[in-house]
Image (cartoon, rainbow, N blue to C red):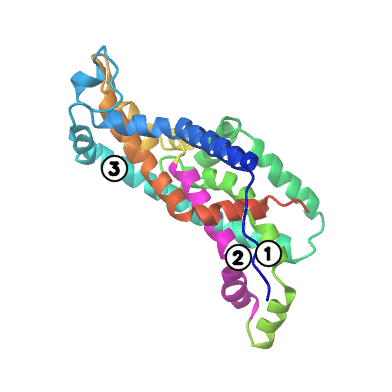
């Protein structure tokens, strides 16, 4: 009869675990405090927001800043613009990025190391460097003042990320799956959509989320290429609560809370896929 060994931790290990837990809690508090402050400020009245005494929670609870934002037509229009730009940029990124990653991962493409290096370099380029050439190109293509212009610009930065992230996934899928699919009568496209995509579901979810967030959080491209004020996204219209009479901080905080809410929800519900996808995509071969 085999006896199970009782798990035993020495006092030194217990103290070490307690210290690490305390440090982890402190780090979490530091990083989450800005989010708490945004939410707390969004439920304060104007008098409390402008008061000389700083309050760390709303003494007089109000939802007026939230109602003011959610019932504002300009806000709803900006929300629609942000959703359209984020969805369009995500679709364009996936249409071009996933097949490129598949080709780089499954086939011996001549000069693939140079392509990968180019993709990595393009991710280092700041958006401000690309504004002028893109503006001239989009002007000739009549894409200024459309949702497609900023979506294409955002996708140009998301595609390299998708290729670098998904390439190790496709490379890790056994070739036996390809052979089995062809024996069963699947063509190249059928095998790609029915076999490959489900096999790398974790990586696909990761790049979908990141591509959507790139479009949702964009400011530079949308401000530059959407010359019409009514087509600007949420990130470009937060300044409307600033005037010569002062700044409505509670409304700005409610606006910011609504802006970051989709980001928080996506990471909360999909964090296991995002962390796993980024870890797998970071493997150097």
Quadrant for the N terminus, please. bottom right
- 136 and 27: which is toward the camera: 27
Q: Do the residues labelled 2 and 1 touch (CB within 8 Å)?
A: yes
Residue 159's disc number: none
The residue segment tinted magenta is: 187-216
Please say whether residue 204 is one of the residues in the magenta stretch: yes
Residue 77's disc number: 3
Residue 170's disc number: 1
Determine which quarter of the picture holds residue 106.
bottom right
N-terminal-most mark, 1 or 3: 3
Residue 244 coordinates in the image, percent (x, y): 26, 14
N-terminal-most mark, 3 or 2: 3
Residue 280 coordinates in the image, percent (x, y): 66, 55
Tell me: residue 3, above or below residue 249: below
- Gap in angstroms between the C-alphas marked 3 and 2: 36 Å
Please say whether residue 113 is one of the residues in the magenta stretch: no
Q: How many marks?
A: 3
Q: Say whether residue 280 is left or right of residue 210.
A: right
Residue 200's disc number: 2
Residue 208 coordinates in the image, percent (x, y): 51, 55
Q: Say whether residue 9 is left or right of residue 179.
A: left
Q: Residue furthest bottom?
A: 184
Residue at 41% x, 45% y: name it: 264
Residue at 62% x, 72% y: name it: 192
Q: Main secondary structure of the magenta part?
A: helix
Q: Residues within 10 Å of mark 1 (few under 14, many from 20)?
A: many
Helix, strand or loop at mark 3: helix
Residue 87 coordinates in the image, percent (x, y): 43, 52
Q: Is residue 231 visible?
A: no
Residue at 22% x, 20% y: name it: 48
Q: How crowded is mark 2: few (under 14 residues within 10 Å), some or many (20 or more)?
A: some
């Amino acid at each position: 009869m085999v006896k199970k060994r009782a798990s035993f931790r020495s006092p030194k290990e217990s103290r070490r675990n307690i210290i690490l837990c305390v440090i982890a809690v402190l780090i979490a508090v530091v990083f989450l405090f800005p989010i708490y402050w945004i939410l707390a400020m969004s439920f304060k009245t104007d008098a409390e927001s402008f008061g000389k005494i700083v309050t760390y929670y709303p003494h007089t609870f109000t939802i007026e800043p939230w109602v003011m934002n959610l019932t504002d037509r300009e806000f709803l229009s900006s929300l629609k613009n942000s959703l359209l730009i984020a969805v369009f940029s995500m679709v364009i990124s996936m249409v071009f990025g996933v097949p490129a990653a598949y080709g780089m991962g499954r086939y011996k493409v001549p000069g693939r190391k140079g392509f990968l290096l180019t993709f990595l370099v393009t991710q280092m380029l700041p958006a401000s460097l690309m504004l002028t050439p893109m503006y001239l190109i989009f002007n000739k293509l009549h894409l200024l003042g459309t949702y497609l212009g900023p979506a294409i610009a955002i996708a140009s930065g998301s595609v390299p990320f998708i290729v670098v992230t998904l390439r190790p996934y496709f490379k890790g899928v056994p070739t036996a799956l390809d052979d089995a699919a062809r024996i069963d009568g699947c063509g190249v496209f059928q095998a790609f959509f029915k076999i490959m995509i489900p096999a790398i579901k974790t990586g696909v979810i990761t790049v979908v989320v990141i591509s959507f967030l790139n479009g949702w959080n964009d400011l530079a491209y949308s401000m530059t290429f959407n010359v019409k004020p009514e087509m600007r996204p949420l990130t470009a219209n937060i300044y409307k609560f600033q005037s010569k009479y002062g700044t409505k901080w509670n409304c700005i905080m409610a606006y910011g809370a609504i802006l970051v809410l989709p980001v928080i929800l996506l990471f909360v519900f999909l964090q296991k896929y995002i962390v796993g996808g980024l870890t797998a995509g970071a493997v150097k071969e």
